[in-house]
């Protein structure tokens, strides 16, 4: 069988870069294969995807050497329109892919460009919409949909053109765990029904492996490090060596001293054979039992019977009450649209509560202005580029203090102190443009910390980050927390929730469904369904190995991993 995609000694160098991003790539992908491409940030995996869909060289210019053929045709001799007939791309940001005013219009866009007749167009749109379970919402606006529904519309929009190859660029980045699981199942169903060639570029390895893939391709430093079956790769240590997070159950087996072999079928927790190692896991658990230390400090942030309606009609927050103690680090979790972001807007004063109290360190914030609340509660947005406006790091961190009218001597002292805390002091004279994403994230946190907030709220602090950057950001936040900073994380990341926040507040439909330990929530099928989460694979491993208390096993794993990370 001839490959549908073939790289031969292929290299690519952006004109703006001194060295090649892709180096001597040799890769063959065959019709009907389902491929997962992983790699740390900056490894070249996204560039590889852009070479496939034609953004390179037709949108992003650079120097190409070697050969890349799709369906036997050299891509550099084609144009982006002809390449789009072979490969459809589903972006991680679905909103950036919408062009129609309704779901039906958006799906039909490619057919309209080809002057397909109305009757045939409507028939084709209905057929594809049914495949992705969106046929009942064809009249809806794409921007009224949930994150998972938006992904389905984007998928239908590229499938309607009947392309042979589907490329998914981080399809799980903006989805809650349960919706991400459904998205992987949908991609797998499309693969089985159509036998299209599927290529997935994604950080969340364990989530993608919820369904089979034919091969995993690990890219690092612009080169293919390994191209092999999932069973073989998970039985090795190569993922961890290149900064890729292994599935949690694989890490747990290794902590227990298990020598993982491909014959154990480790690619899925469901297929994993633990018959020869269950006793080792049970023994490890007995040796490492742990209890979470309860925080009994005085209250720092209290919400009492908060209610909120948009336009005085649609009730979004429905009588929410909780208390966060000084020095706690807590996750707020739940499905897309559960009310997490609205809750943070109410705390910060961007929206005004209809009923209830918001108390910070004994003071009710409800009547305070946004500026007054900013002295008590600080927020760090998901994307640091949305927060940074000054050319130099020092000026950016000093901006909030200058707005308060402080003297330059006091500003200098406070800025330099917070730079030292954030590990930025050596970069104090650098331009922000010279920083990495992770360093920019630290600057955005420093901009808030310098104002001495009593509570720090972070929205999806690790979204789209590889394991190395994830660990860097979270260990820094843990250090702040250890020094007494109260931190609230709004997140979809269950690994983050388990490892760094002993307590989580799960929301659904504007109400709290559970306020308890993270381990307890992720070991409860009922709670996970209510909050659109996914049970942790650690719980499934505990059940497979005959451990009576999966919650206690997960707690032991978390405490052990914290020691390992430090």
Image: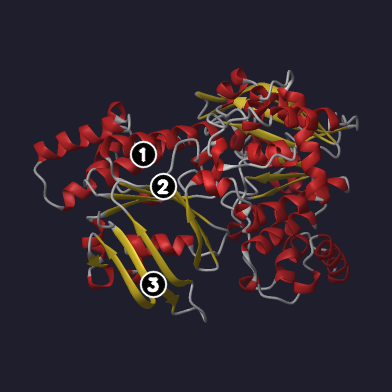
Decide if residue 100 is in sight here.
no
Q: Position of residue 112 (x, y in %)?
A: 17, 48
Q: Residues within 10 Å of mark 3 (few under 14, many from 20)?
A: some
Instruction: Identify residue for label 3.
Output: 10
Q: Earlier in the sequence, mark 3 or mark 1?
A: 3
Instruction: Identify residue for label 2.
Output: 95
SS label for mark 2: helix
Q: Position of residue 285 (x, y in %)?
A: 79, 29
Left or right position of 311 against 355: left
Q: Earlier in the sequence, mark 1 or mark 2?
A: 2
Q: Are marks 3 and 2 in contact (CB under 8 Å)?
A: no
Residue 386, image quadrant: bottom right
Question: Mark 3 or 1, which is nearer the eye?
Answer: 3
Find the distance from the CA under tag 3 to the CA under tag 2.
Answer: 32 Å
Question: Residue sitting at 37 percent across and 65 percent down?
Answer: 51
Instruction: Identify residue for label 1.
Output: 142
Question: Residue sitting at 55 percent across and 45 percent down?
Answer: 204
Residue 53, image quadrant: bottom left
Q: Earlier in the sequence, mark 3 or mark 2?
A: 3
Q: Residues within 10 Å of mark 2 (few under 14, many from 20)?
A: some
Q: Residues within 10 Å of mark 1 (few under 14, many from 20)?
A: many
Decide if residue 130 is in sight here.
yes
**Which color mode does the image show?**
secondary structure
Q: Are marks 1 and 2 in contact (CB under 8 Å)?
A: yes
Find the distance from the CA under tag 1 to the CA under tag 2.
Answer: 8 Å
Q: Position of residue 156 (x, y in %)?
A: 29, 40
Find the distance from the CA under tag 3 to the CA under tag 1.
Answer: 38 Å
Question: Residue sitting at 45 percent across and 45 percent down?
Answer: 171
Left or right position of 414 against 308: right
SS label for mark 1: helix
SS label for mark 3: strand
Q: Depth check: 12 or 398 in front? A: 12
């Amino acid at each position: 069988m001839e490959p549908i995609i073939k790289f031969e000694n292929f290299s690519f160098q952006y004109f703006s870069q001194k060295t090649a991003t892709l180096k001597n790539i040799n890769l063959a992908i065959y019709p009907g294969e389902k491929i997962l491409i992983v790699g740390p940030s900056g490894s070249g995996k996204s560039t590889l995807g852009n070479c496939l869909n034609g953004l390179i060289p037709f949108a992003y210019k650079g120097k190409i050497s070697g050969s890349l053929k799709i369906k036997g045709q050299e891509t550099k001799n084609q144009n982006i329109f002809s390449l789009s007939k072979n490969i459809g791309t589903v972006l991680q940001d679905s909103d950036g892919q919408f062009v129609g005013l309704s779901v039906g219009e958006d799906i039909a866009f490619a057919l309209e460009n080809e002057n397909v007749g109305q009757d045939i167009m409507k028939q084709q749109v209905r057929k594809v919409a049914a495949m992705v379970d969106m046929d009942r919402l064809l009249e809806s606006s794409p921007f009224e949909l949930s994150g998972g529904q938006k992904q389905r519309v984007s998928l239908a929009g590229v499938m309607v053109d009947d392309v042979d190859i589907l490329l998914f660029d981080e399809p799980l980045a903006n989805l809650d765990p349960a919706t991400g699981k459904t998205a992987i199942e949908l991609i797998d169903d499309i693969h089985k029904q159509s036998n299209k060639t599927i290529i997935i570029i994604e950080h969340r390895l364990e989530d993608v492996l919820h369904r089979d893939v034919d091969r995993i391709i690990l890219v690092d430093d612009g080169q293919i490090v390994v191209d092999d079956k999932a069973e073989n790769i998970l039985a090795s240590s190569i993922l961890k060596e290149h900064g890729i997070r292994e599935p949690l159950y694989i890490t747990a087996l290794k902590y227990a001293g298990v020598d993982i072999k491909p014959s154990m079928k480790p690619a899925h927790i469901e297929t994993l054979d633990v018959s020869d190692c269950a006793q080792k896991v049970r023994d490890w658990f007995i040796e490492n039992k742990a209890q979470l230390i309860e925080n009994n400090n005085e209250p720092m942030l209290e919400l009492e019977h908060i209610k909120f309606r948009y336009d005085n009609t649609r009730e979004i927050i429905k009588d929410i009450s909780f208390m966060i103690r000084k020095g706690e680090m807590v996750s707020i979790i739940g499905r897309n649209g559960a009310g997490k972001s609205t809750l943070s807007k109410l705390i910060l004063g961007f929206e005004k509560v209809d009923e209830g109290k918001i108390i910070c360190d004994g003071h009710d914030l409800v009547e305070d202005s946004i500026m007054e609340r900013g002295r008590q509660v600080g927020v760090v947005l998901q994307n640091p580029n949305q927060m940074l406006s000054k050319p130099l790091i020092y000026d950016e961190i000093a901006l909030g203090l200058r707005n308060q009218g402080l003297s330059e001597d006091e500003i200098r002292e406070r800025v330099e102190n917070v730079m030292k805390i954030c590990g930025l002091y050596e970069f104090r004279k650098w331009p922000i443009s010279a920083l990495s994403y992770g360093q920019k994230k630290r600057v955005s946190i420093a901009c808030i910390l310098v104002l001495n907030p009593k509570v720090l709220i972070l929205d999806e602090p690790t979204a789209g980050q590889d394991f190395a950057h994830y660990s860097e950001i979270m260990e820094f936040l843990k250090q702040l927390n250890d020094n007494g900073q109260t931190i609230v994380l709004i997140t979809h990341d269950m690994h983050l929730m388990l490892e760094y926040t002993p307590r989580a507040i799960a929301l659904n439909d504007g109400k709290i469904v559970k306020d308890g330990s993270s381990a307890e929530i992720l070991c409860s099928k009922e709670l996970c369904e209510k909050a659109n989460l996914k049970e942790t694979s650690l719980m499934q491993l505990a059940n497979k190995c005959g451990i009576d208390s999966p919650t206690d096993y997960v707690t032991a794993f978390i405490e052990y991993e914290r020691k390992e990370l430090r």
